[in-house]
Amino acid sequence: MKPKHEPNRVGDMAEHYAITWLWDQGYEVFKNCGCTGAIDIVAIKNGEVTLIDVKTMHQKEPSRPKHFSTKGRTKEQKNKGVVFLGYHPKTRKLRFIRHIK
């Protein structure tokens, strides 16, 4: 029987996988030291700054990140240009989520 992971632990894993994935993509990565806020990671590549919020993908609906289908980005995140980076806990794959303005 597989052990269940606490939601916070899954979120922590998602952020750590995101950091290494972004490194592999050629980004310099800076993590938010707090556990709250609109931004999890600041990533820089070729002088371009990307503000990222890492989201765990639904188990049943892997193409959509958790909460994305109902809330999407907050007003603050939209104003700051934050993008979601989706993490699938079973496959441990990541992808940027396209946003509707």
Image (cartoon, helix red, strand yellow):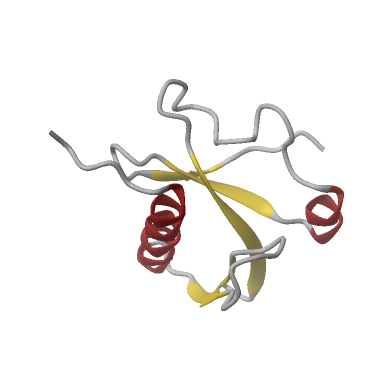
Q: Give the answer, above or below, for where 5 lies relative to 53.
A: above
User: Across the whole image, how many numbered discs are drawn on residues?
Assistant: 0
Screen quadrant of the N terminus: top left
Q: Residue 98 location in percent, x, y?
A: 64, 37
Q: Residue at x 61, y 59 (%)?
A: 52
Q: Nearer the viewer, residue 91 or 35?
A: 35
Q: Nearer the viewer, residue 14 or 96?
A: 14
Residue extending farthest top: 60
Q: Is residue 6 left or right of residue 98?
A: left
Q: Residue at x 39, y 64 (%)?
A: 16
Q: Residue 74 location in percent, x, y?
A: 80, 47
Q: Residue 62 location in percent, x, y?
A: 44, 27
Residue extending farthest left: 1
Q: Is residue 3 left or right of residue 64?
A: left
Q: Is residue 17 left or right of residue 52?
A: left
Q: Residue at x 39, y 39 (%)?
A: 88
Screen quadrant of the C terminus: top right
Q: Residue 40 location in percent, x, y?
A: 59, 64
Residue 90 occupies quadrant: top left
Q: Give the answer, above or below, for where 60 lies relative to 93.
A: above
